Amino acid sequence: MAVPSFLKVDPAIERWNRMREDAYKHFRFTPRTTWVTMCGFVLVPGAIYYLASKTHLKWNWAGKRKGEALDQA
């Protein structure tokens, strides 16, 4: 015997949820998705690495007092 539900089921929301759950089944690499993938996996880490390598050993915080310069000359 079925248990009565107090929750109304909206078919549009159920269809949208099913589409989201099955999105990986219909995915294709298009020029746009390739560009987004390259930005996420190549350009962003590359930019972080570049910034980190440019600022590495540029600042010295150890033993500095108020008024002393932080940059290494």
Image (spheres, helix red, strand yellow):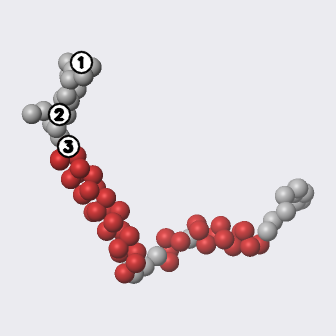
Q: Mark 2 highlights which residue?
A: 71
User: Looking at the image, which residue is at 21% across and 20% down?
Assistant: 64
Earlier in the chain: of badge 2 and badge 1, it is: 1
Which marked residue is nearer to the observer: mark 3 or mark 2? Answer: 2
Q: Which image quadrant is residue 34 in? A: bottom left
Q: Is residue 70 above or below residue 27?
A: above
Relative depth, front residue between 7 and 37: 37
> In x, y percent, where is residue 17?
65, 67
Which marked residue is nearer to the observer: mark 1 or mark 3? Answer: 1
User: Looking at the image, which residue is at 50% across and 77% down?
Assistant: 26
Residue 5's disc number: none
Earlier in the chain: of badge 1 and badge 3, it is: 3
Instruction: Report the Cα–Cα distance between label 2 and label 1.
Output: 13 Å
- Determine whether the residue tagged by mark 1 lies in a helix, strand or loop: loop
**In-image side of 26 versus 12 (left or right):** left
Q: Mark 3 highlights which residue?
A: 55
**Which amino acid type is marked by label 2?**
Asp
- Determine whether the residue tagged by mark 3 lies in a helix, strand or loop: helix
Dots 1, 3 in contact, CB < 8 A: no
User: Looking at the image, which residue is at 20% across and 18% down?
Assistant: 63
Dots 3, 2 in contact, CB < 8 A: no
- Determine whether the residue tagged by mark 2 lies in a helix, strand or loop: loop
Query: What quarter of the picture does the N terminus occupy?
Result: bottom right
Q: Mark 1 highlights which residue?
A: 65
**In-image side of 24 versus 2 (left or right):** left
Tag count in the figure? 3
Earlier in the chain: of badge 3 and badge 2, it is: 3
**In-image side of 23 versus 68 (left or right):** right
> In x, y percent, where is residue 68?
20, 23
